[in-house]
Structures are given as C-alpha cells and as structure tokens.
Amino acid sequence: MAEIIINEEFCKGCNLCIEACPLHLIVEAERLNAAGYHPVEFRDDEGKCTGCALCAIMCPDSAIEVYREA
Amino acid sequence: MKAAEENVLLTGNEAIAEAAIQAGCRHFFGYPITPQSEIPEYMSRRMPEMGGVYLQAESEVAAINMVFGAAGAGARVMTSSSSPGISLMQEGISYLAAAELPCLIVNMMRGGPGLGGIQPSQSDYFQATKGGGHGDYRLIVLAPSTVQEAADLTMLAFDLADMYRNPVMVLGDGYIGQMMEPVRFKRPEAAELPPKDWAITGAKGRPRNVISTLSLDPETLEALNLRLHHKYEDVIRNERRVEIFEADDADIIIAAFGIVARIAKTAIRILREKGIKVGLVRPITLFPFPYDAVSKAADDLNVLVVEMNMGQMIEDVKLGIRGRSEVHFYGRTGGMVPSYEEIVREVERIHGGGG
Amino acid sequence: MMVMVKAFQRPRTLIPRPTHYCPGCGHGIIHRILAEVIDELGIRERVAGSAPVGCSALIHQYLDCDMYEAAHGRAPAVMTGFKRVHPDKIAFTYQGDGDLAAIGTAEIVHAAGRGEKITAIFVNNAIYGMTGGQMAPTTLICQRTTTTPYGRSPEAAGYPIRVSELLSTLEGAVYIERVAVNSPGNVLKAKRAVRRAFEVQMEGLGFSMVEVLSPCPQNWRMSPSEAVKFVEDKLMPYYPLGVFKTPEAMER
C-alpha cells in the first residue's frame, strides 16, 4: 500500500503527473491555489497506489512526496 | 630568474609579467595580440615554474570570463591585451565591476580605431576611464611612464584590486611594452587586505556563496549602484597619484601621461636651457584623476596637454582647471609618437603668444 | 496501523521554494535530477555551478550550492577559470540553447576541446524562452517562433545544429550523451546520464556534457502534455537520444 502527498502551493497544474500515473489516481481540482493554478489531487479510495513514484519523477515542481509501506 | 631585489634589464611587457608573479599572481588567462604578446609568452614560461596556471584562451572574450571565474574563486588573477582585444573584454569588465571581483587587466595601447595599427597610442583613455563597458562603474586606472613604474604599478594594482574589490587596469602602450630598461622588483609592504569570504570555493562549513550581477528589482539594483558609488568615492579620496615636475616656478605647464610625459621631460630640459620655464603635471592614476593637483599646478598659467590621441585626457584637465586658464592641445595619433622637438616648438609657439 | 516510509522527496540541494518556471517546463525536472545527483554523490560542499542567461538565470535561487552567474554564453570560460583555481572541486555549467549553441559556441567548443574537467548540462528546447520565444540555433525546420513566423526555412535561417554530435568529434570531450525529459523512464535515464557525467569529471578524465531535450509549453504554444509529445514526435527524431562519446570506447 502506498500514497502520495501533493504540496498544493508548489503545484502549477501542468498535469504531467496525471499522465504519468498508470492507475489514473490523480485528478485536476476545480479550485485554484494561491498562485492561480488548478492544483492536482490524489484520489485513491480503493487503495490501489503502488508507490511507483512515476508522478513524482515527472513533476517539474517537486510537489509530490511518495510514501510506501515499510 | 634573478632574486627579486636585483636590477634586471627587461622590456615593459616582461617587467609587468614578472611583477605580477612577484605580487603573487598565479593565474593568467590571455590571448596574443601585438604589441603585448610577450606578456602571455612570458607567462607561459614562468607560470609553470611557479606552479601557477597559464591558459591561452580562444579569444579575449573567453579570457576575461576566465578571469571572472578565477577572481570569483578567490585567486589573484590577471589578463592582458591591446586596444581591440580590450574592446572585446568590455562586457566582462562590466560584469567584474558589478560583481566586485578583484583582478588586473593590462592594456598596452595601439593605434585605433578598428583594427588600427600595431604602433603605440594613448587613444583608449576614454575607454579606460569613462566606461567602455555598460553601466555605472569605474576602473582604477594606473598609467606608468617607465618600465620600472610599470612593474611597481602592476604590484600595486593587485593590492588595490583586493582592497577595493574592483578590477584595476594598468594602461601602458606599445612603446613602454617593447622598450628595455633596468628594473628592480620591490615587493611592497604587505597590505592589510580584507578576507575573501565571498569567494566560490565549495560551500563547506558555511552558507553557500553566489556571485551574481542580475537584479530584476530596481530598488536592489539602485542600492548596488549606490554602494559602488560610495566605494569609488573612497578610491577618489585615497588613491590619487600624480607626479609634479618643475612646476613651482613654471610659466607654462605641460600635462601628459605615460610615455608622452617622458618625452615632455626632455622638451622641458631643452626649453629651460632656452630660458622658458616649463613644468609638467603627470597623472599616474587616470582614475581617480588628480583634478586638484592639476588645478593647483596650472594655477592661471597656459597649459599644454600632449597626448597620443585626438584629445582625451584634455577633457579631464579642463574639468580640473574650470576655465581659469587657457588649455592648448598637441596630439599625434595612429601610432605616431611626438618628438621632443615638436613639443618644444609647440611650447615656444604658445609662449610667443600664438594661440 | 501500517508504517509508511518516504520513498520519494525533494532532494536536499533543491531549495524548497516555488519556481518562476512555466507549468510543465523541463527546467524543474532537470534542476531536480541535478540536485539528486549532487546529493547522491555527496558533493554539495565541493561543487560550484554557473547560471546562464535565459529562463534558468535564476537557477542559483533553487540550488543550495556555490553558484556564479555568468555572462551570456560565457559559463564554460567562467567555470574553466574556477576549475583551474580549484582543481579538486567539481564544476558544472547549466545552459540553454541560446547560451550554449549561439553566443557561447566558441566557449563550449574550446572548453570541450581543451578537455576542461567540467560538466555542461545543455537544456535544448529548440527556442529562446526567456526573451519570449524567438528562434534558437536548435529550432527545427518549419518550426514557428516569433522570429520565424512562417516556420524556419533553411534558405533564410539555415539548419538546426546538433551540438552533441559536434562536440563528440573533439578529443577533449570524453563523455557526451543526449537524453530527454518527456517521460518518467527518460527522466530516470537522464538522471543516470547526469550522474555519469559528474563521475567522469570526478575521475579526472575530461570534459563531459549531457544534452537534455526539454519541453517549453509556453513558447511552443502548447499544453504541457502536447509539449512532451512534441519532444517525442519532433525533437527526438532530429536529435536522437544516446551516448555519443564515452571514455570506455576511447582508444588511449
């Protein structure tokens, strides 16, 4: 089991993480962050995230931290 | 190489190079150009002997940027060139001044503008003292008139550069560079120099350093310019150097710098033998220009400015005199060097009432 | 309660501040992998880099190590000066396609030719970003920019320059690789290339360079995902990825 934490204030809504995630667990939010971008959100109700970190690897703003089971 | 305190016979170019070594310079980046190629050649032999670095850059543009890197790394570093090459360095000089990096730049002037000629001139005075590069900055400019003075001012230049965190220029010409005179390398007293804690050396045991000249915020950039300006005011207050020669009883004053002042001294001797009392004011620092000394020596006498250009230092002479006396000009340019006979004739013409 | 460990985070050398780069700009990815390599090699206290003129002129705001700002194109000369003073330290330049392949062509060719023990990170996005999207020496034929409004034509503006291939002809250049940051897999390969380039420097072998094909959504007038597709579909065919020079392959 794994999860990601997105630092919204660094997110510029480029959505490259959305494309990178093979399980489509990231979506763009409706709201705007302080910089005026639509940040992305992690939606993993079924606990599918494997912690592959492809999202974090693509993120140009180092806005994603990835956690995995120890 | 002989021990430092003995007399040796060297050309101006060699003396400048050796003086830099004696002053502790261990990094030279340069490019060949007549009439100063002997400086890189000398350095290419001497630097490896001293465990220093001689690097022939691909251009003067590259050379001045290597100086930027080495100066930013905390080293005593120099480059040398001649007029067209110094033009290429202007961007780098502006950056060095903005980043407050110490270094020595030697210009052995030749005829210009354009590719010009390889014979000596003094036509880079404006470039050296009034700008050349963009922005509000000044170079400390030292103008030797003998091979010995070229050596002494080279050593002084490194200390001034470190003291004020500013690039310094030794402004010579092809004549001084090529002529051969006895030199003794007198190591100056160890100056009290500030530590280079701003240098790029790897951020170990300290916060990292950044050497930067970009200020997108105008208030920050204005503050930098004000800081530089205050520094230049200190330089003006403390570092003016001038030679006054036989001016006390003079009826006419000659103002000249560099090699022309040497020629003028011969003319003065001949004129005095003829009964005309002439004195000489020789600025040694072209920036800071010794306005007060010029003004005092000139008093309300006729002044003849002699230069190897179309009239550059004369503007600073006039600024110092502020209209109190008549300022005449005699110049040769394009590589022509005025003879003492020409200067004698010109003084006689002025003395005889010719305007 | 499951114990979670952090498997991925911002590297220590990358200063935690939001960047001024556009959404989807490749610089953010490249800064991060550079910072990761500096951390993994443990060289933060021994390294100095040079910022270019270009969008990444402010890279020194994002990397916590000693940094110069060089004049446009002059970074290889500046870092040559630094490295000749401190041969035991690590030197890198970070340059765009204007900085390295236009105004700075002499400096990069000669630093590579002399085999200066420095590492160049060359960010190639085939356009001038900072000044608003003009043609770069690496702009593709038919690519529209603000100074090639009809698309770049060879008659008017010549052909794009393949810098990695060019520099690999020089004996002093001992490691040259072209990579891209269009996908996570390629980002990881790019990081490995950057690491190898620094190792080559640390082994004292000579000049190393990594050319990174990078998206510029803003000036290409595309979304970030369209921009990474442009890297794949248009840039990579003209600028093939791969190793052009490697020390192991050299006969010495």
Image (tube, coloured by chain):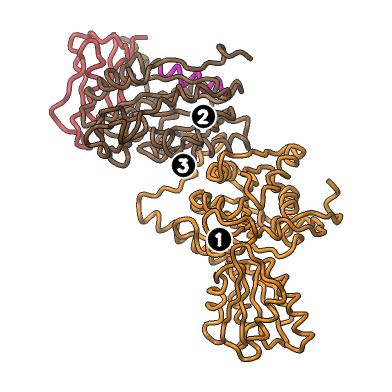
- Looking at the picture, which amino acid does disc 1 mark? Ala
Residue under disc 3 on the same chain as residue under disc 2: yes
* Dot 2 amino acid type: Arg
Q: Which mark is residue B128?
A: 1
Q: Position of residue B300 (x, y in %)?
A: 60, 88
Which is closer to the viewer, label 3 or label 2? 3
Residue depicted at x 67% and y 76%: B281
**Main structural element of the magenta stretch: helix, strand or loop?**
helix
Q: Residues within 10 Å of mark 3 (few under 14, many from 20)?
A: many
Tags 1 and 2 touching, CB below 8 Å: no
Where is residue B144 shown, x and y percent of the image?
A: 69, 63
Chain C, hue in figure: brown
Element assignment for label 2: loop
Supply the letter of whichever chain is red. A
Q: Are marks 3 and 1 in contact (CB under 8 Å)?
A: no
Quadrant assignment for the N terminus of chain C? top left
Q: Quadrant of the C terminus of chain C?
A: top right
| Dots 1 and 2 on the same chain | no
Name the subunit of mark 1: B
Whether residue C8 is visible to the viewer of this picture, yes or no, is yes
- Could you give the CA–CA distance between mark 3 and mark 1, rounded to whole angstroms? 24 Å
Q: Which residue is mark 2?
A: C44
Q: Position of residue B161 (x, y in %)?
A: 62, 55
Query: Residue flagged by tag 3: what amino acid is it?
Result: Glu
Return the mark for residue C69.
Answer: 3
Instruction: Report, in whole angstroms, how far the alpha carbon at label 1 lies from the one at label 2.
Output: 40 Å
Q: Nearer the viewer, residue A62 or B109?
A: B109
| Residue depicted at x 60% and y 47% | B196
